[in-house]
Image: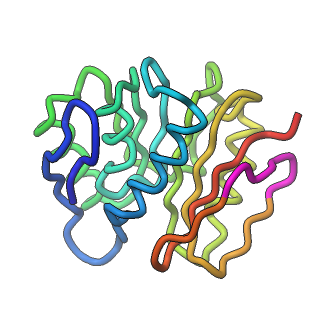
Amino acid sequence: MRIIAGEWRGRKLVAPEGDATRPTADRTRETLFSMLASRLGTFEGLRVADLFAGSGALGLEALSRGAAHCLFVDQDAAAIRAIRRNIANLHAQPRSEVRASSALALGPAKEPLDLVLLDPPYDTGAGCVAIDKLARLGWIGESTWVSLETAKPEAVSIKGFAEEAVRDVGKARVHILRREG
């Protein structure tokens, strides 16, 4: 696993030990960030959350491309160790916050984020539940972009959200979502 673009392009990332997490493949990340770049234009200054973070590869990719800050959230101890190690190796501590918690346990937000990246376990529906709850708690606002990775056959339906784009990459399906105005 490597950072695809930006300031840390080509730098290696460590994956969590064990098989409790499924890191997003480089090809899937490349597709996702291409989809986001065509919509966002730039990542400069964005406030981002990487939920169900695993290795933290999605959030670190956003930071590498210029995001101002990323909140990494995962409840698995091995994932938290990998995230902290990757952040330290890239000297990204000033722009990073790590929470050892469930994405569903986040309390109310002070203000909405610019980009929320979710890569939950496949076929659990956890991503849809998290997006719904985070919207109600103020993490996802009217201008927030949301990325959700699922298995190809997994259905995505969240009240108040519209799919802006969907792409299949290998076994994964990447959904870009926005709140309906």
Q: Residue 177 at x, y = what percent?
A: 70, 48
Which is nearer the eye, 131 or 36? 36
Task: Name the image quarter holding the C terminus.
Answer: top right
Q: Residue at x 51, y 72 (%)?
A: 172
Q: Residue at x 14, y 29 (%)?
A: 91
42 to 119, vertically: above or below: above
Rendered position, 163 above or below 149: above
Which residue is farthest front? 38
Measured from the top left, where is residue 95 in percent x and y?
31, 23
Q: Main secondary structure of the magenta part?
A: strand
Total numbered circles: 0
> Does residue 136 appear left or right of residue 34 in this picture?
right
Display coloring: rainbow
Quadrant for residue 88, please give it.
Answer: top left
Identify which residue, 167 or 49, lies in the foreground.
167
- Is residue 8 toward the left or the right of residue 30 in the image? left
Q: Nearer the viewer, residue 109 or 92?
A: 92
164 in magenta: yes
Q: Residue at x 75, y 53 (%)?
A: 163
Query: Where 42 sits versus 169, above or below?
Result: above
At 32% across and 49% down in the image, what residue appears? 56
Q: Is residue 138 left or right of residue 55?
A: right
Residue range (magenta): 158-165
Percent from the top left, x then y, of residue 116? 56, 41
Indicate whether residue 3 is drawn in magenta: no
- Residue 1 drawn at (x, y percent): 21, 60
